[in-house]
């Protein structure tokens, strides 16, 4: 009997909390420490003699490269698997920091801009491959839960990442900061080598036009639009909260991000199964609504407690919406183009952040930073309207999601029973 139990455990895919899951959370913690220190890189630009315009261009280069690289990244995931794309992504995010170190006193040379584009491409590779991994290894009927829990340590990195980076620069200077950022990327790449992931290979590229197949799939359009609107809903505070707080003389505004991280981690643990159990529309409508409320609170904020409460509310919205949207994108992707479709979905998230920075930045020049936040509520409001229209046009879809969940459980029970029968003879 002990032998039989061992075989059953190894044969079943019903366990979410596997060796891969725990390695993935250590991995995401280290690479997220690298990514969330992006806020420190403007100091490198100013050190090199760049002005505010150059800072904006330098930061935008990262996002543009992440978006433009997505078609290639998707093809690489479908062709070679998520493990090798994650290794490549981590090295591309970490190693350019050594290039910055070598060029630290030479100004913003063309090589510096190339290194920045490589970092953006690396982030796109990591982001797409990691969420594909979470969706790919999910037990039946638990894809949203898998995506929610795989990234939970990454949210935790928000609380300490920028603080560590700021302290490194203040105490030891930019050279030490760049060495630590490179080390974080290398450590994450090493952890990615420890994954034991079956490669769900796609057919050869000339026989499987993955990008065309994904783009042609109209079912994917809805999660792509939701991904862009979600990014536009959530990114305004990350881009514009600091100058607003400075304008209003609110010291300690970084507690917004603490509230965001704490509530985001908590809701992912508590609500990790909600979208799988109740359907993604029942999760996304209140999530986008909460985001609107949080943005309005920021607009009226004159103190740290108000910003902290706004962070808590928007953190809940992000903790529920991100897994639901990415899970929806994976579910609606055509077979043979899952990696490409996930690259498109995560690419739309980066595109939404980029567009938010451009559009709201222009508005800030005319009306100031405060007006940005009520204006930013347009994106979540549009998302709620689109979701309500979807409910109106497909009123039975919610019940179908529940039926699908029950069917998944029934199938899983039959499959395990069949395996037990085969093993026991």
Image: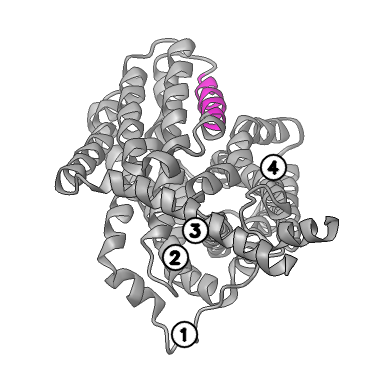
- Given residues 201 and 105, the one toward you in this image is 201
Residue 362 pos. (x, y %): 27, 39
Quarter of the image for residue 93 reads bottom right
Who's the residue at 48% across and 17% down the image?
308
Mark 3 → mark 1, Cα distance in angstroms: 33 Å
SS class of the residue under badge 3?
Answer: helix
Of circles 3 and 1, which is in front?
Answer: 3
SS class of the residue under badge 2?
Answer: helix
Say which mark, if any, is on residue 70: 2
> Which sits earlier in the primary sequence, circle 3 or circle 4?
4
* Image-based side of 133 in relation to 211, left or right: right
On screen, 315 above or below 190? above
Q: Which residues are magenta?
A: 253-266
> Which sits earlier in the primary sequence, circle 3 or circle 2?
2
The residue sitting at the right extreme is 2
Mark 4 → mark 2, Cα distance in angstroms: 30 Å
Residue 220 pos. (x, y %): 31, 61
Mark 3 → mark 2, Cα distance in angstroms: 35 Å
Q: Is residue 370 magenta?
A: no
Tag 1 residue: 205
Mark 1 → mark 2, Cα distance in angstroms: 16 Å
Tag 3 residue: 411
């Amino acid at each position: 009997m002990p032998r039989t139990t061992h075989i059953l455990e190894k044969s079943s895919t019903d366990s979410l909390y596997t060796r891969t899951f725990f390695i993935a959370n250590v991995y995401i913690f280290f690479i997220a420490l690298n990514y969330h220190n992006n806020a420190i890189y403007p100091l490198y630009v100013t050190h090199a003699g760049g002005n505010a315009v150059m800072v904006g261009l330098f930061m935008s280069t990262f996002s543009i490269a992440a978006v433009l690289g997505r078609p290639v990244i998707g093809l690489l995931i479908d062709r070679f698997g998520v493990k090798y794309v994650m290794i490549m992504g981590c090295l591309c995010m970490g190693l350019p920091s050594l290039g910055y170190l070598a060029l630290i006193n030479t100004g913003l040379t063309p090589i510096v801009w190339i290194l920045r584009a490589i970092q953006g491409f690396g982030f796109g590779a990591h982001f797409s491959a990691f969420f594909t991994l979470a969706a790919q290894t999910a037990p039946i009927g638990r894809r949203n839960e898998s995506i929610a829990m795989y990234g939970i340590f990454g949210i935790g990195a928000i609380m300490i990442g920028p603080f560590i980076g700021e302290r490194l620069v203040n105490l030891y200077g930019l050279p030490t900061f760049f060495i630590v950022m490179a080390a974080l990327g290398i450590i994450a790449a090493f952890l990615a080598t420890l994954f034991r992931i079956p490669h769900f290979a796609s057919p050869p590229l000339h026989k499987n036009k993955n990008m065309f197949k994904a783009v042609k799939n109209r079912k994917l359009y809805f999660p792509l639009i939701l991904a862009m609107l979600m990014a536009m809903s959530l990114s305004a505070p990350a881009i514009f909260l600091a100058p607003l707080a400075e304008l209003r003389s609110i010291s300690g505004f970084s507690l917004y991000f603490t509230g965001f991280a704490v509530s985001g981690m908590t809701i992912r643990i508590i609500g990790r199964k909600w979208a799988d159990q109740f359907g993604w529309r029942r999760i996304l409508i209140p999530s986008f609504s909460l985001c609107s409320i949080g943005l309005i609170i920021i607009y009226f904020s004159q103190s740290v407690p108000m910003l902290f409460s706004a962070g808590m509310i928007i953190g809940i919205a992000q903790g529920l919406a991100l897994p639901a949207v990415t899970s929806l994108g994976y579910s609606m992707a055509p077979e043979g183009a899952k990696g490409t479709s996930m690259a498109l979905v995560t690419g739309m998230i980066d595109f939404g952040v980029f567009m938010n920075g451009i559009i709201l930045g222009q508005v800030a020049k005319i009306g100031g930073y405060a007006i940005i936040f009520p204006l930013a509520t347009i994106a979540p409001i549009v998302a709620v309207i689109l979701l309500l229209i979807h409910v109106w046009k497909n009123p039975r879809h919610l019940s179908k999601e529940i039926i699908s969940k029950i069917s998944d459980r029934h199938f899983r029970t039959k499959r395990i029973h069949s395996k037990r029968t085969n093993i026991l003879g």
